Image (tube, rainbow, N blue to C red):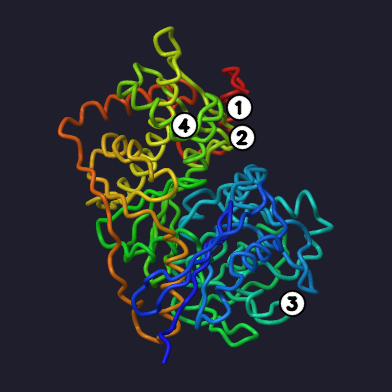
């Protein structure tokens, strides 16, 4: 008798990655990937095409499958099950003003935190619904069903077309919409109607963590799926005191807790996780791509960029990069741009610019970590994952700036692994997810002399304060823009 196998899918912003694992041990047997189109709006069928391409020959004989997808994106279908427009992704900031309006209309940030554990920003689905209602009302009138990217792929795997089969989601991804309450485990259809100007399309049924969504036409079990961050947490098997810093297209800092979070500053999103617990999370738009953009600027590859950065002293002699290349979510500056501060003859060198890019990216993540700490999250160690975590210099600077030990798990597809583990859980019918072996990891100790890291952060905060007057995270975008216009920054 053959051992059971499961597939996990990571449908991210940039690509679709598939891993096939032994259901009992988690050992990766096969893996593949296919690219997604660039941009902040994408036709949903492109994700399905990428899944079919990446899964060709791999998904034919698995026993179960689950999808972990990029969060927040708006997939709107008509009554025939066809998209009314391209999906708006989490990193599309055109809905920033809509988020500001919604905050005011419900009575302020605290009202939103109390209702759904989070304060809307441009990324949230509810803000994108408001934008659609106001800017494309004729399309909004055609919307019959709303789902998230992972929901769409789960639906397609089950033969989704037209009005069948039933739409499903999970609590982890539902908690990022702005109209589902993690604390109460129920939709807030009043907030859906508020966001969508009175419209209340059909929403997916929220499945329990180990509940199956159904089966593929060929009989493969399809698990609930989840959002990418909840998938990574499940793939890593994080425990109390573990805080994950993920350096991918976006940056995220999150931890697993047993109690829901409700942060009225808007910095910490009060998400649910994929196990029945909660996942307070801080997200930045700017992470690994800061290094890619800097390498392009200097005309080098990423390996050379790291070598250059290692040649400059810590702090780059006062050169600071504010890494808001495409606006920023935390701090809430959707229309900001990247800035270099401290240019002097001695700092106008490729090595210093490279160093400033590494330190700017990680200072931004350290500020995200501060928000979690301020909400009472204890930090025993940092787990550093994502594409940029493969750099030894990133781990070294991270330990220096964070001031705590940094653990770098062996590079792996942790989002897809988390989805595979969820599929194995649904397949087993057990009360808890399967215990797969811990991942090999490298350890970077906290610095013996933390003063250097504090100096780097102080210079970063000074540069940001000079430009943005240290605005509160929850300050409405329109207020920030007025301040910036008065200073001549817009």
Identify the residue shown where x is 53% and y is 28%. Answer: 338
How busy is the neighbourhood of tag 2: few (under 14 within 10 Å), some, or many (20 plus)? few
Vertical relation: 17 (above or below) 436: above
The residue where tag 3 is placed is 161
Q: Real-space Cα distance between discs 2 and 3? A: 41 Å
Find residue 452 and report its image quarter: top left
Q: What element carries label 4?
A: loop
Left or right, 81 with respect to 223, comes to right
Vertical relation: 216 (above or below) 376: below
How busy is the neighbourhood of tag 4: few (under 14 within 10 Å), some, or many (20 plus)? some
Q: Real-space Cα distance between discs 1 and 4? A: 12 Å
Identify the residue shown where x is 40% and y is 57%. Answer: 412
Q: Real-space Cα distance between discs 1 and 2? A: 6 Å
> Is residue 177 in view?
no
Q: If you read the primary sequence from the N terminus, does the residue marked by circle 2 or circle 3 appear first?
A: 3
User: Split into 4 quadrants, where in the image is the C terminus?
Assistant: top right
The residue where tag 4 is placed is 471
Identify the residue shown where x is 81% and y is 63%. Answer: 141
Q: Nearer the viewer, residue 139 or 253?
A: 253
User: Split into 4 quadrants, where in the image is the N terminus?
Assistant: bottom left
Q: What element carries label 3?
A: loop
Q: Real-space Cα distance between discs 4 and 2? A: 12 Å
Q: If you read the primary sequence from the N terminus, does the residue marked by circle 4 or circle 2 appear first?
A: 4
Q: Real-space Cα distance between discs 3 and 4? A: 47 Å
Left or right, 92 with respect to 232, comes to right
Vertical relation: 477 (above or below) 310: below
Q: Disc 1 vs disc 2: Cβ atoms closer than 8 Å?
A: yes
Mark nearer the viewer, 3 or 4: 3
Q: If you read the primary sequence from the N terminus, does the residue marked by circle 1 or circle 4 appear first?
A: 4
The residue where tag 1 is placed is 482
């Amino acid at each position: 008798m053959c051992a059971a196998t499961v597939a996990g899918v990571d449908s991210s912003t940039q690509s679709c990655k598939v891993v096939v694992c032994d259901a009992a041990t988690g050992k990766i047997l096969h893996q593949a990937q296919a690219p997604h189109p660039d941009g902040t709006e994408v036709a949903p069928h492109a994700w399905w095409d990428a899944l079919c391409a990446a899964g060709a020959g791999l998904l034919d004989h698995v026993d179960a499958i689950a999808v972990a997808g990029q969060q927040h994106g708006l997939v709107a279908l008509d009554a025939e099950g066809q998209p009314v427009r391209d999906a708006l992704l989490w990193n599309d900031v055109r809905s920033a003003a809509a988020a500001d309006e919604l905050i005011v209309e419900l009575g302020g940030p605290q009202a939103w935190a109390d209702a759904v554990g989070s304060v809307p920003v441009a990324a949230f689905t509810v803000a994108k619904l408001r934008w659609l209602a106001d800017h494309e009302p004729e399309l909004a009138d055609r919307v019959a069903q709303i789902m998230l990217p992972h929901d769409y792929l789960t639906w397609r795997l089950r033969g989704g077309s037209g009005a069948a089969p039933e739409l499903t989601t999970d609590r982890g991804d539902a908690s990022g919409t702005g109209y589902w309450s993690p604390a109460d485990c129920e939709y807030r259809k009043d907030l859906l109607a508020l966001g969508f100007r009175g419209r209340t399309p059909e929403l997916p049924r929220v499945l329990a963590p180990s509940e199956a969504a159904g089966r593929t036409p060929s009989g493969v079990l399809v698990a609930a799926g989840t959002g990418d961050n909840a998938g990574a947490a499940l793939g890593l098997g994080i425990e109390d005191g573990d805080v994950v810093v993920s350096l991918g297209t976006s940056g995220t800092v999150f931890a697993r807790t047993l109690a829901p979070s409700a942060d009225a500053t808007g910095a910490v999103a009060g998400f649910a996780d994929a196990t029945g617990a909660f996942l307070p999370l801080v997200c930045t738009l700017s992470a690994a791509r800061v290094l890619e953009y800097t390498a392009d600027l200097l005309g080098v590859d990423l390996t050379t960029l790291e070598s250059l950065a290692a040649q400059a002293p810590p702090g780059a002699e006062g050169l600071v990069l504010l890494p808001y290349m495409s606006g920023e979510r935390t701090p809430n500056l959707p229309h900001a741009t990247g800035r270099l501060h401290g240019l002097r003859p001695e700092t106008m060198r490729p090595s210093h610019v490279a160093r400033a890019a590494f330190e700017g990216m990680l200072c931004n993540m350290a500020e995200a970590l501060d928000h979690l700490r301020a909400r009472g999250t204890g930090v025993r160690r940092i787990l550093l994952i994502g594409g940029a975590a493969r750099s030894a210099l990133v781990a070294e600077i991270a330990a220096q700036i964070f001031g705590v030990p940094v653990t770098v798990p062996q590079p792996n597809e942790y989002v897809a692994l988390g989805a595979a583990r969820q599929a194995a859980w649904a397949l087993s019918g057990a009360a808890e997810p399967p215990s797969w072996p811990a991942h090999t990891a490298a350890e970077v100790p906290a610095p013996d002399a933390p003063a250097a890291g504090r100096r780097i952060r102080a210079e970063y905060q000074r540069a940001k304060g000079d430009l943005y007057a240290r605005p509160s995270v929850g300050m409405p975008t329109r207020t920030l823009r007025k301040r910036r216009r008065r200073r001549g920054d817009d």
